[in-house]
Amino acid sequence: MSSSTPRDTQKGAHTSRISGSTARDAFRWVIVISLAYVMFRPVSHNSLLLPALGLVAAGSLGLVVTAHPFRLPARPIVVVFALVFLTGIYGSLLGIGNPGLANGVLVWIAAPILFALLVWAADETLIRMILLAAAIMTIAISAIALSYVALSVAGFREFPAWLVGQLGLSFDGHSFGITTITLYGLSTLVATCPLWLTALILPRHRLLPGKWMSGLAGVAAFLTSLVAGRAAITIVALIVPIAVWIVWRVYSWRRPRTRFVAFAPLVVAALAALAILALSALGNSAVARAWDRVASIITGSGQTIEDQIRAEESHELIAGWLSSPVLGHGFGAVIPGYSRNESRPWNFELQYHLILFQVGIVGALVMLVAAVVGVLALIRSFRVTPELAPVLFVVTAGASALLIANASNPYLQAPGNMWALFLLLALINVALLGGRRTSAAQIVDDTD
């Protein structure tokens, strides 16, 4: 008859902790590598994209199950997801029989379930790894785009067919007066370009990559937006970082600032101005076209063919919404006699118009409440975990840019573009749970 000694018990517990830590590290790497692929190629090639998203969910579930102690998400995060799922269920039931219902279920139910696991599983280590992967993917996408434009302008057009197909490359040297290209990964820059420019002008933080990497990623992405003719990226890259920096200055006005932090926005603005002037001298009018698009959306007067199409689409979606303004028409509904894509007539560029058309005032109000709860949770996270403030501002910049650009481009119709929005919810969850743990620790200390 054998008996265990205290030393054997301690050895077994130590071995168990090591194996548990190794498993959690493996789950994190599965998530980060899979998510890096999603960032690099967020659309098309669903035979690889969907398994990658599935691996993100599987790795997240592994982290949730192996967490010690087991934890539930913060209450505001649960409320946000509950409201999103409520909207998804409502729009799906209302859309039974609509031709594009499956797409609505994917966007409003399936994808949020997947990313809810990521939000639940995330900790500071995982967020740091994801942000590093985002910086690397931003640099890689920008390098490919800039090299492709440079080679195409120089007259080299004989790219391998397999490379063109895998990356979704195409080139137009004079589309609406500017150079334009297509590349599957360009939509990732909508969030990461302003995110890394914001990281460059805000203080350092241990969860963020170094300043040199943030600067390289931000500047490269901004140059890519200019040469690629992507008005949405250009707009948010100019507006969001400065707006976030102003809020940061108000938030931290009593805190001491280094000379770099104080003058970084001016340096970034000067570099942006030089880049714009250089491209203007070369005949590229991306920034002017970007601002024209903003004006056309506000006034309804299109400046280019694309803007005229969006103005017409706005009129059609509003007219369709007015035929059922309270309840909406459900996910996958179409407008009789009007479509932007014959093979997918339920898809439109103007996403917030589309929400009103699909789920009416009822669904829009539910999503508005979800947004308010999310913003209040963000504000609370600054209060309970102020140490995370710089990274909260940076990730908020990326999510805000994505939401702004989504107004006139269907970015959030693709689950591969949603990660930046849910990364912010994950960080808020970490901040709120961190504050809860800190409060609990203080109670224990006071009791002792």
Image: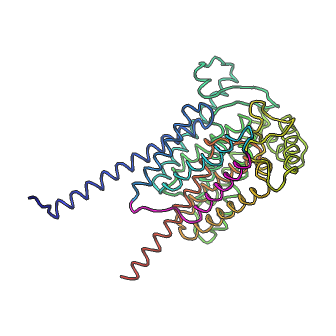
The mark total stands at: 0
- Which residue is more in the foreground, 362 or 220? 362
Q: Where's the N terminus, which quadrant?
A: bottom left
Residue 276: percent from the left, percent from the top? 74, 41
Residue 336: percent from the left, percent from the top? 85, 38
Q: Is residue 89 visible?
A: yes
| Main secondary-structure element of the magenta-colored stretch | helix
Point out the residue furthest to the left here: 1
Q: Does the stretch in magenta take in 87? A: yes
Point out the residue furthest to the bottom here: 447
Apparent side of residue 13 relative to residue 47 in the rendered image (left or right): left
Specify start and end residues of the magenta stretch as a single range: 68-95
Tell me which corner region of the image, top left, top right, bottom left or bottom right, holds residue 13. Answer: bottom left
Q: Is residue 273 visible?
A: no
Residue 391: percent from the left, percent from the top? 56, 58
Q: Image point 42% across, 61% down: which residue?
A: 70
Q: Where's the C terminus, which quadrant?
A: bottom left
Apparent side of residue 228 relative to residue 321 in the rendered image (left or right): left
Tell me which corner region of the image, top left, top right, bottom left or bottom right, holds residue 74. Answer: bottom right
- Which residue is more in the foreground, 216 or 228? 228
Residue 288: percent from the left, percent from the top? 82, 41
Apparent side of residue 438 relative to residue 9 in the rendered image (left or right): right
- Which residue is more in the foreground, 152 or 40? 40
Q: Does the stretch in magenta take in 244? A: no
Q: Image point 42% across, 74% down: which residue?
A: 441
Apparent side of residue 429 relative to residue 156 in the rendered image (left or right): left
- Which residue is more in the foreground, 83 or 46? 83
